[in-house]
Amino acid sequence: MLDQLLLATKKGTLIFDRENGSWKPRPISHPGLAVSYVARDPRDGTIWACMDNAHWGPALSRSKDDGVTWEDTSRIAYPKGARYIEQLIPSPETMAAAERPIQYKPAVLMKVWSLGFAGEDQPGVIHAGTLPGGLFTTRDGGESWELNRPLWNHESRGGDLFAGEATSKNQWGGTPAAMAYGDFVPGIHSVVVDPRDSNHFYVAVSCAGVAETRDGGKTWAGCNRGMLNDYLPNPEAAWGHDPHLVTLCPGQPNRLWQQNHSGVFTSEDGAGTWKRVSKPEVAVHFGFPIAADSNSGNTAWVVPLRGDQERMTVGGGLFVARTDDAGGSWQVFRKGLPQENCYDVVYRHALDASGDRVCFGSTTGNVYMSEDRGETWSCLGNHLPPIHSVRFA
Amino acid sequence: MAQVTFTKHLQRFFPSLAALEVPGGSVREVIDALEQRYPGLSAYLVDEAGRLRRHVNIFVREEPIYDRETLGDKLAPNDSVFIVQALSGG
């Protein structure tokens, strides 16, 4: 089990260290600056923070001395000529305008939403998922970043818009989570690298679904078979799904988990097929985060919400649900969590597991830790900033 | 030469940043000149398409610039250029 917690918050980066059996917070890093995601590269120990600075633009900050000092790194930038097909957020007015000519917009980086570290077989390789839907990769430890053009130019996005007009229909939808950044665009929030082979990795996109590469990003294929999007005319469409987070079990990497707008899904064949394993009768259906057990492919945790319009705790009480049989059933755990007048929402990156430890943070600045696989909880802090991500490190 | 001053908030990222003179016949050229003096600074002010960031403003002779897309506003010799941040949020 890992003995450090990294929190990305609206007001900076918070690090908790486990000392003498308790979790101690350090003074905040990046004070006053919004951070969307923080994680440690397990290969060299560098801590990476995705700066979500509304004033000065999205950037990356890194620490090579365990969070004592931080440095800005080179910025991720969309290359000249990168374009996307404009989409309007669905409404009666915009649906009526659906037949208007295609409008193109120049791509600029709005947000670095997620990071995915390659394995020991690819030192220095890190992937970054962004708004407006581009995947970037560094091969030199963050000194330079390059847009993954095969995914950006994928036929599901209209083809190679660098070269000219769209040659296929765009099937990637925007995410409402992008509206605060000025446009209704897709976002890559999950980059999941196969621990057996770093050339094999997945991205999950709101609102498109899951895509997979087996050749290090040269070619991509959608893998959304079995997915059900309850608010599409065709729920089984190849694209247009709304994963909120996708992760896999490191010990059994063919086991993937997906908390989706339309429920909890799992795959036991490397995303070849998905199966919905929601149990609405125990309120396990809607939510944002999902965490996989390190070793057992049968175990995962979720923090459900009453969905999908209210996005509030179910009945005013906070709970965590765990499955130990690959989604066949879910146990609900409430001990140590507030059960009345509670309005905590847990964002997609704000739940993590390490061994028997499970931790999550909420938009209302609460952090809860379990040392017994989610069954009982204690609070590490009540007055923290809104929490965007929680990662053990 | 343009006479450039900055919001003090940029000193958080560029501690040595101070008022200075740089050559430039347009706001775009001033930004390019500033990037030469302070590598990385321009990314704080404009996005990769060259557009002024939404919460940044530039004043020339106490007037906000007109062209936020390409920064084509022309400068006269010794014009003052003030780079400021629209602080917001909570």
Image: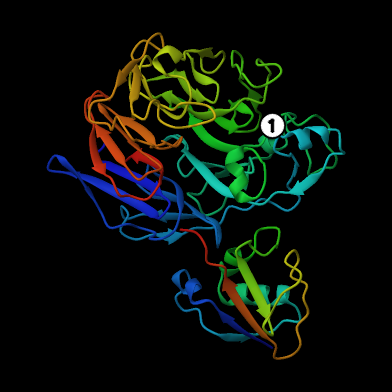
Residue at the location (49% across, 23% down)?
A: A258
- Left/right placement of residue B50 relative to residue A37 reads right
* B72 to A215, vertically: above or below: below
Residue at the location (62% across, 25% down)?
A: A241
The answer to which image quadrant residue A213 occupies is: top right
* Quarter of the image that includes the N terminus of chain A: top left
Residue at the location (50% across, 26% down)?
A: A307
Please state the horizontal and vertical placement of residue A386, each as a whole percent of the image.
40, 47
Q: Which residue is mark 1?
A: A172
Type of amino acid under label 1: Trp
Q: Nearer the viewer, residue A222 or A341?
A: A341
- Tell how many labels: 1
Q: Tag 1, which chain?
A: A
Residue at the location (58% across, 52% down)?
A: A76
Please state the horizontal and vertical placement of residue B23, each as a whole percent of the image.
69, 84
Asked if residue B89 can be seen in this view, the reply is yes
Please state the horizontal and vertical placement of residue B29, each as a whole percent of the image.
72, 76
- Left/right placement of residue A353 relative to residue A202 reads left
* B10 to A125, vertically: above or below: below
